[in-house]
Structure formats: C-alpha cells, structure tokens
Image: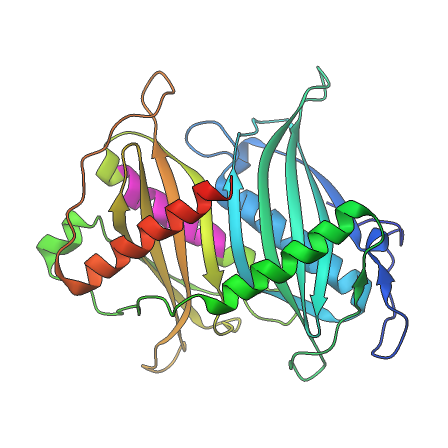
Amino acid sequence: MGPATGSEGGRRAVWREGARDLPAAACRGERMVVVWPRDLNTYHSVFGGYVMQRVDALATALAADVSGLRCVTAHLDRLTFTAGIGAFQRMRLTAWATRTFRTSMEVQVDVQGEDSASGRTWQTAHATLTVVGLDDGGRPAPLPQVVPSTPREWEDHRLAAERREKRLALPDPVPAEFGAPPAARADALCLESTSRVVPAAHAAENGQASAGWILALADELAAISASRHAGVPTVTVAVDQVAFRRPVPIGDILTLRSYLTCTFRTSLEVRVDAFWRPRYGRAVETVAHCAFTFVAVGADGRPVPLTGLVPQGEREEALARVAWERRRERLGAG
C-alpha cells in the first residue's frame, strides 16, 4: 500500500498557517490494496475491521499530506457497508477533504471492490471522519482551508457544516461502566471483553494507538456478542458516532467490552466501550464508545429474524432508546 496520491503526486505539502489555502481538487487521495485470505472473516469476505483500518489510514494520511502536520482521527460519524470483497480481489479507497474547521478537517472515504479478471467494480463501504492536525507538542494545530469550486464540492462543503452542527449537538453518550454486570445479565447481554497491550506496530502518527486498530478490535469483539445472541452468522453493516476521547500510548493497556443494546427485526446493535489503563497502576479512563450494527444471516444468505432483547433498568432502557434513534437517523440518511 503506497502513499496517498492526488493532484500533489503523493508529496507531503509544506503548508503553514498564513500560507495559501488549498483547492478541494488538491485534497484528494487514493489507495489500492489486494485482499488476501488473511484479511477475510469466517464468511470468506473482507473483515469489516480491516476495512476500518484502511479507511482510517487513508483519511489521516491525506490530511497529513495536505497540511504537513501529524494527523489523527478524532471522530467517526458513520461507516456503512453495502457489499463484501473476496480473496484476491482488490479494494480501492478514495478519500477527499470536504471542509476545514480550523484545527479539524472532515474527510470522506469511499471504498469499492474490483475484480481484476472480469473488470467488475462495486460499492463496498463509505465513511465520514473528522481528523485533527497536531503540532510538535501534540496540541491541535490549524489546518489549511479547503476551497471548493465545483457544484459537488460546494455541496460537500455545505453538508460538512451541517454534520458538524449535528455532531456537536449530540447528547453525551450513556456513560460506560468498567465493572461487569451480574453473571446472569452479562450472559443475556452477550458480554465479551478483551485486553491488549498496545504494540508499536499499530501506532498512529502521534505515537499512540491508531483509531483504525481500535475500531478493528472493537468490530471483532462486537461480532462475537452479535453472533452469540443471533445463533447464526452476523455481518457488520454500520458503525456510528465514535468519538475518541483520549489517546492510548504504546505499551499501555486497551480494554474493550462489548454487549447488546437493542435488537430489531433482523439486525441488532452492539456497543463497545474502550478503556485505557496504564501498564503499571490501577487508573481507568474511557477512550471511546462504538455502536456497531449487525445483520443476522441464514444459510441461504438472507437476513433472519432475531429474538428480542428486553432492557432491564434505566441504563439499558437509555441505551435501547439511543439505539432506536440512531437507527432512525441512519435509515433516514439513506
């Protein structure tokens, strides 16, 4: 996988505050990767978490290329999947910056599958991310303004502002609970957990765990919870409203916990809470909350109805209510 390429030819721009702003046409990048058997899930399609890692890597590389700064993902508005990609097929990722908000930049990433033998292409996924530029001290730093010129670029520019307003108006998420619920309730919610020491191999440009790696781990864990409840295979169709609240340094511990929040007819939502813990010590801080939507799939490849989950207590009722609101908003957005 080579560097992000666009009209700048993949060169890292030397942009500084006060320099000219950049036309939207120059704020584009593309990567092509081959999907290998090691990148597949148990259903012989590309693992959703692998796509998330590639999306995060391209979005942050694009922002870094046009700004000359280290850039990290601060928020994932939404990533939706529409189709899979098989082994030895290609995955083409195209990213473009839509608007800058001083120290942050919205980046859209489109993912397509390609079959080199037949020449067939198809839509696989689409994501909207917010990336932040960092100075040498790790503080947010100004980014170049993205200047639209075509009608499509102006429309993207306008919608980016609307998405930002909605994001800032979102209520605080239901707080995470590091302690596990009673055993009987943990089983009903299909609670799963895992802890990892953050390796240097998965560091972002700021030397902390990359958002893409965290999302990939979260997706894998959430899939276990989803399939346990469904009793059949499940596939990721969306991940929504992920805000990264603090970095996780290399060598520290990332703990993830996944559990059901709501079931619909043939789909269900699984929340994953990510926590930071120092390698030596007892402190615990929340890193992110991730909301994954899965669809249960039968042997014939069609969605199958699910057993309903009845929430118990105020917290579970609040989580279910937010899940329904998220689903209505996602379906309304098309």
Residue 310 position within the rendered picture, expressed as x and y whole percent measured from the top left: 15, 47
Which quadrant holds residue 172? bottom left
Q: Is residue 4 visible?
A: no
Main SS, magenta region, reads helix
Q: Is 217 in the magenta? A: yes
Q: Residue 173, position in %: x, y? A: 36, 66
Front-most of residues 27 and 204: 27
Residue under the point 52% across and 56% down:
77
**Magenta-drawn stretch contains 87:** no
Where is residue 7? Give x, y as percent. 89, 50
First to last magenta residue range: 215-227
- Which residue appears at 22% of the width and 39% of the height? 229
- Asked whether, in this view, residue 298 is left or right of residue 137, the answer is left
Q: Which residue is at a point 80% across and 55% down the rendered structure image?
A: 27
Work out whether 83 lies above or below 144. Answer: above
Relative to 96, say whether 162 is above or below. below
Q: Nearer the viewer, residue 164 or 106?
A: 164
Can residue 16 be spotted in the picture? yes
